[in-house]
Amino acid sequence: MKQIKLGTQQKIGLVLIAAFGIALFLFGGFHAVRSERCCGAVTAEVLRMEHKVMTDDDGDTDVYRPVYGFTYHDLQYEVPGKLFTNIETYHTGDEVTLRINPDDPTEYYDPVRSRRIPIGVSAVLLVFVGAGVVMLVKEN
């Protein structure tokens, strides 16, 4: 049997591909656990859109997150969105369906806004896999 010797680039490529697999496994597991816990649904109203300005090397960026209000078992809840984004997804007064944890209604997720996150994460991870494959097959 012939032994295969891997160069430094090939080893780095394998590490990148393995890291992608682990990240995908962890991200998928986290999402599955949250989806299982948040099995109830409520109709929430967007009470307001919080706004702040993020400053970095590229300048200022306006970011937004909704603040939701809903009633569950005759109790009123007001919960902020999990993430600020540069897109104003909702407007004050919009009705949104949230998935909540019946045991702790402050644990929730918004299926519409949560759908955007996996696309961005997948794109970043795909870049790492692409780099890993290129490094793996590229000859020294």
Image (spheres, rainbow, N blue to C red):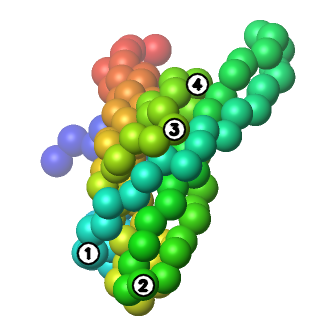
Tell me which label, 3 or 1, sits earlier in the chain.
1
Of 5 and 132, which appears nearest the observer?
A: 132
At label 3, which amino acid type do we have? Thr
Instruction: Tell me: residue 85, above or below residue 97.
Output: above
- The residue pinned by badge 3 equals 92
Of 135 and 43, which appears nearest the observer?
A: 43
Instruction: Give the structural element (helix, strand or loop) at label 4.
Output: loop
Density class for disc 4 (Cα within 10 Å; few <14, some 14-19, many ≥20) is: some
Distance Cα–Cα, label 2 vs label 1: 18 Å
Distance Cα–Cα, label 2 vs label 3: 23 Å
Tell me which label, 4 or 2, sits earlier in the chain.
2
Q: Which mark is residue 86?
A: 4
Tell me which label, 2 or 1, sits earlier in the chain.
1
Density class for disc 3 (Cα within 10 Å; few <14, some 14-19, many ≥20) is: few
Distance Cα–Cα, label 4 vs label 1: 29 Å
Instruction: Give the structural element (helix, strand or loop) at label 3.
Output: loop
**Residue 112's spot in the image, x, y percent?**
32, 43
Tell me whether the residue at label 3 lies in contact with that at label 1, contact meaning CB atoms closer than 8 angstroms: no
**Residue 74's spot in the image, x, y percent?**
42, 84
**Residue 120's spot in the image, x, y percent?**
42, 32
Q: Residue at x 36, y 24 (%)?
A: 130
At label 2, which amino acid type do we have? Asp
- The residue pinned by badge 1 equals 39
Tell me which label, 2 or 3, sits earlier in the chain.
2
Density class for disc 1 (Cα within 10 Å; few <14, some 14-19, many ≥20) is: few
